[in-house]
Amino acid sequence: MIRAVVRGFGASLPKRVMTNRELEDLVETSDEWIVQRTGIHQRYIAGEGETTASLGAAAAKAALDNAGLAAADIDLIICATSTPDNTFPATAVNIQNRLGIHHGFAFDVQAVCSGFVYAMATADLYIRGGMAKRVLVIGAETFSRILDWTDRTTCVLFGDGAGALVLEAAEGEGRTTDRGVLTSQLRSDGTHREKLYVDGGPSTTGTVGHLRMEGREVFKHAVGMITDVIEAAFDATGTTADDLDWLVPHQANRRIIDGSAKKLGIPLEKVVVTVDLHGNTSAASIPLALAVAAGDGRIKKGDLVMLEAMGGGFTWGAVLLRW
Ligand code: UT7
């Protein structure tokens, strides 16, 4: 059977780092509060000329270099983002153009913080269905552009950046020892839409709007939803937490990450945490974390890796893959 195997990874961050201390000048907050409640120490903020597409294209180029491939080798680009350069065309098409390719096809996936998990599941289906052989899966965001910088309950949490994987079709045996994506579990429930949303849009206000969140409400649901889909991924593959080499969670809040790992019996040594460095970069957080942990040699070929995310919608999901 065909499997979608990771062939390369890459990341790109804006030049500017913003520390918690800098936020103390903007809103009534403190480094201590932010670190204690979230684990965030700093985030990257896009400057002039840095956009979701420019960061996404840079991450894609890094992933192609890491894979030893050229842009010409790619036949599908999927970009997960909620902060596109334009309402349309899709940021993925913008990135395709920046990579200098005019063949194949490209589209965006919008599932907010779960976007990268949704994009991985989508890429896996295109590859296993035979419609694509090599796919760039990108998570890219510039949430700084939709933040209300006077709202301390949200502006301290988010950051900008992009990460990418190259997935390639490879022959597998249909066992969990195969490299590649082993299962994807996706969920959504729109009854929670007002707990985390943007208060504008093309069809309602005709404006871009700002991010609004009832943080405590999101927090209340997060651990349960995350552990449910991870358990579903274990059940679907006959694997258990003991088999896992790495949990690479969406990086929203250190307390949610630790709580989920504890509930699943996954030791914290097996959890990749980058929320301290990047803040919450929505759909970019998982590929950024993967690039850090694969880049420093923690995640190795053959490792069993669980990706998970939960966010606006609500949407949530998990992807289990062998690296
Ligand atoms: O990625 C998509 C998914 N999003 C998430 O996963 C976010 C989920 N939620 C969270 O991570 C947490 O709920 C937050 C980090 C947003 C907030 O932490 P919390 O422990 O739930 O705090 P809280 O909202 O209950 O607020 C506690 C207090 C409040 O003051 P009072 O009412 O107790 O007097 C807030 O007004 O902290 C206050 N507060 C702040 N204080 C200093 C809220 N934001 C700040 C701030 N600095 N930036």
Image: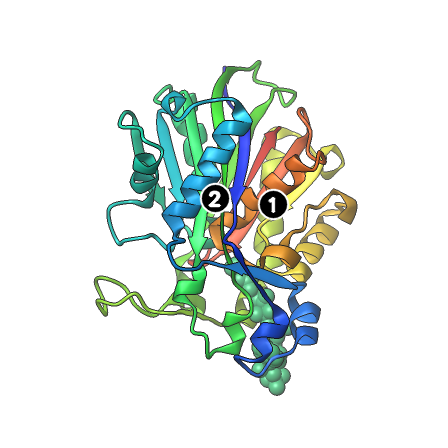
**Given the image, on which type of amino acid does mark 1 rest?**
Ala
**Residue 199: x and y, percent?**
34, 70
Few, some or many residues within 10 Å of mark 1 (<14, 14–19, 20+): many
Few, some or many residues within 10 Å of mark 2 (<14, 14–19, 20+): many
Looking at the picture, does residue 95 appear above or below residue 46? above
Left or right of residue 87: residue 310? right
**Given the image, on which type of amino acid does mark 2 rest?**
Phe
Q: Which residue is mark 1?
A: 289
**Residue 201: x and y, percent?**
27, 64
Q: Is residue 127 visible?
A: yes
Q: Residue at x 25, y 67 (%)?
A: 207
Where disc 2 sits, the SS reads helix
Looking at the picture, does residue 260 appear above or below residue 212? above
Instruction: Kindly indicate the quadrant of the structure image that contains residue 40.
Output: bottom right
The first of marks 1 and 2 along the sequence is 2
Q: Which residue is mark 2?
A: 116
Ligand 1 located in image quadrant: bottom right
Nearer to us: label 1 or label 2: 1
**Residue 53: x and y, percent?**
37, 46
The CB of the residue at mark 1 lies under 8 Å from ligand 1: no
**Residue 184: x and y, percent?**
51, 36
Q: Residue at x 71, y 48 (%)?
A: 264
Of 248 and 69, the residue lying toward us: 69
Looking at the picture, does residue 237 appear above or below residue 73? below
Where disc 1 sits, the SS reads helix
Q: Is residue 121 visible?
A: no
In which quadrant will I find the C terminus?
A: top right
